[in-house]
Image (spheres, rainbow, N blue to C red):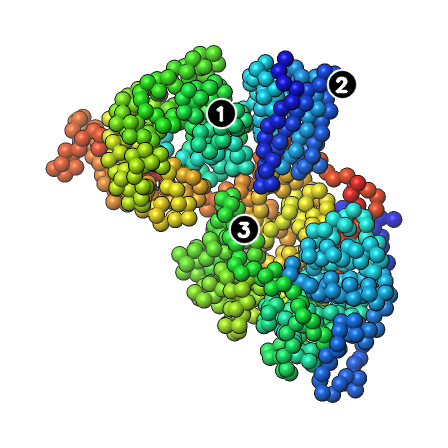
Amino acid sequence: MMIKNVLGRVLPEEINGLKTIPYQGVGKYIPRGRKAAPPIASCANYPSDGNKVVSSLREALEKCGLRDGMTLSAHHHFRNGDKLMNMLFDTAAEMGVRDLMFYPSATFPCHEHLIRHLDAGVIHHIEGSLNGPLGAYCSAGKMRGLGVLRSHGGRYTALQDGEVHVNIAVIAAPTADPFGNATGSRGPSACGLLGFALGDSQYADKVIVVTDNLEPFPCAPFQIHGNLVDWVVVVDEIGDPSKIVSGTTELTKSPDRLYIAELTARFIEAAGIMRDGFSMQAGAGGTNLAFAIFLRDLMREAGVKARFIRGGSTKYLVEMLEEGLTDFILDGQTFDTVAVESIRNHPNRHVTTSPFTSYNYHSKGNFASIVDVAVLGATEVDIQFNANVATHSDGILQHGLGGWPNCLAAKCTILALPSFRDRIPVLVDEVTTVCGPGELIDVIVTERGIAINPRRQDLLDATKDAHLPVRPIQEIQAEVERICGGKPEPPQYGENFVAAIKWVDGTVMDALRELR
Amino acid sequence: MGQMHAEAGRREASVRSDCYVTIDRRDSGGLAIDIRGKSERFYRSSIVQAVEAMLEQYGIRAAAVRIDDFGALPFTLNARLECAIRRLGKEFDHPPAQFPTSLSNYTVARDRFRRSRLYLPGNEPKFIVNAGLHQPDGIILDLEDSVAPAEKDTARILVRNALQEVDFYGAEKMVRINQLPLGLADLDEIIPCHVHTILIPKCESGQQVAEVADRIRHIRAKTEQPEPVYLMPILESARGILRADEIGAASPLNVALTIGLEDFTADIGAERTQEGRESFQARSMVVLAARAHGLQPIDTVYSDVQNEDGLRQSTLESKQLGFEGRGCIHPRQIRVIHEAFAPSPPEIERAGRIVDALREAEARGSGVVALGSKMIDPPVVKRAQKILKLAKQLGLR
């Protein structure tokens, strides 16, 4: 049986045993009831000297009662340098456990190793961003359950409303003490923040902290409360520092991408968004970094200062902070070593954020919607301004959703992207996979012009005399199709669903089928 | 009967927006088309159609064709296909009878601004398609130094298709042909396809310019194109510089003279420096020769792409020497160059007063233009008008 949501996307009636709630529109779904809660713990069951260190990950998992069919979670703070997730499932396999559900905050190409545990039945399925090899595995229909992709906020939301119940959360920590207090800002594997593990530490039945840098109590300041932690494990190496944060963040050298970045900055100035006390979100992709630099120059020229910049922080944002071009950086992630250092050097001007503060649908408001302008990317956009970040036009799961769907809540959302890549159009009639609704996407900036969503007459009016190449999206699309030699052929799907895309509120925005 | 096997295109690991075509003719059995790679999933039927249509043009009915695709746009796919077929032998080595309809056949004025001209390697499709977006005054599709000797034939076809099919958004479409005599064969392919201006590299005599002009006249006699093709000789040697006057005078098709300093400094045995003392006289001679023949003097490229301040400084010096434009090797250089060649506020102000004086003189019915007590000569008036035109175009006035 299948159902359709308001976007007309066809969905399975059930996803991994739960009834599908179709996407209904932005802000339309208002669930009721009470939030989930972890079981009551008692100090009496924990060592009074505060030493929760056990000898191995296996012992910790045994003490937590790991058994078949449980849900385990882990996090992507170490990005492609993570060693914990593979270690975790190797241990589970050794213990002979089967049919686990894995709930990572994201996976990276280094987690291709997990495919053997999926094949062998140790992992039943993964609900989390499926990148690279794991995405291809899922799209080929090889996973037993459906892949469920959630935004960073949606992942927290699902923990909070009980849609996902984590039995054991395993948190990789660059520094921790024997009590379980932990931080990401210090230690050989320093990654900045541990915000993605916050929800798991609060809602999981059992919590294990794994570190390669144990220091005596207290680990100060800490980001994860030891009071929520059951056991602490010390290992030789929790991550590969060279792959956790890059030493330098690379700016794009592509003239076309630089041009897109420049147009984006000029648009923000022309639209009147760049004014004293404004706020923005900037990502870490090559185009986004370049955009921040162009905007910085325009801000300098105009003598304008921002109140805050949200971002994965980078050297370039740190420079703006030090130059006084912004009062605060709101950090969700940390992308280079300069930014990791700046968090230590300017503790009062970096505001540590998490999916709870920024993105959570079950909160009483969140930070992301306070932002004046967010500049993001996408793999595809359609003429309804719906956008895709999970697959390319080939329909193969390739990227996680990350915070992208949550950031669309900004007052003005701009997607800065090329209008085609090689021969493949990025502007299409209908995106292959909907990850964000056109209702929330205001502007598309491409190398062939700027398309403003007709819903935003205010932006159209504000920029009409600005000497910017503003054009209807259909006109840019027609030009792209002329260059590429017509419309691309759509992917050929089989019958079976393989994955679902959740909107930030937990409803289902789209579902993917296996590829033929 | 020609060969049975040929290949064309690029397939190194870093290749994007290109493809590699392998063709094996057979005696019978029809066509077997094997498409692999990036675009296959999205444009399979379109690629098959392109292969069939191209083979049809050359009367090939039985062959195995393999396309390894890295995201080639149609103009590139067609160029690689055509080149592979033409490499099968003499009987195939001619352009197809039918070209795709031109999407880019605007004309340009003889005296248009030529402040910036962006060099594009002629065998690299990924830079070609978006070049016009960066709004240079001209784009140069290069067949000479940027193309390896073994790839001259395929670059020539790619450049021809680009001239025909890629929209350069109003930029003057220039081609740097190879040194003569190879350059003459380039003309046969290029001239019928909406090129505006031909750059003649390492030009050393008026005779060479005349040869190019003759060949163009000859080709155009067959194709009945109304709009002219202009010439821009590049002086890159001591001999060329010493004959700048002769070269400038050699053809009414000349619109500009330019200098290539990388080769020139090597030729005179000097190192190229930022301050450019070693080339001062040569550059001045190009300016003099160009001005003497009513041509635009255009300066060389600035090769340090990262050094924006150096480029600005060097371009201001060019302007001071009398040059009106220069070459670019990266789109980010275009704006800096345009800014440097833009008239300064005092220049615009003075030009305004001169043109006002001209109007007054005309109103009085007098041929003598004067500013205060100073007589203004006609070339100065003309220059003032040009400055105002540029200022207006740049929104400075």
Q: Chain of mark 2?
A: B
Instruction: List x then y, in percent, for residue B179.
Output: 41, 25
Q: Could you classify mark 3 by the number of other residues whose Cα lies within 10 Å: few (under 14), some (14-19), or many (20 or more)?
A: many
Distance between the alpha carbons at the discs numbered 3 and 2: 50 Å
Of A62 and A350, nearer the camera is A62
In the rendered view, would you say A467 is above or below A105?
A: above
- Of circles 1 and 3, the one toward us is 3
Q: Which element carries disc 2, helix, strand or loop?
A: loop
Instruction: List x then y, in percent, for residue A78.
Output: 64, 63
Where's the C terminus of chain B, which quadrant? top left
Please give the residue where the numbered disc 1 appears in the rendered image: B105
Name the quadrant containing residue B247.
Answer: top left
Q: Could you classify mark 1 by the number of other residues whose Cα lies within 10 Å: few (under 14), some (14-19), or many (20 or more)?
A: some
- Of circles 1 and 2, the one toward us is 2
Of A244 and B22, nearer the camera is B22
Q: Amino acid at mark 2?
A: Gly
Mark carried by residue A141: none
Distance between the alpha carbons at the discs numbered 1 and 3: 33 Å
Image point 69% across, 42% down: which residue?
A393
Residue B76 placement, left or right of B187: right
- Are dots 1 and 3 in contact, CB under 8 Å? no
Marks 1/2 same chain: yes
Mark carried by residue A287: 3
Of B324 and A273, nearer the camera is B324
Mark carried by residue B29: 2
- Of circles 3 and 2, the one toward us is 2
Image point 62% across, 58% down: which residue?
A407
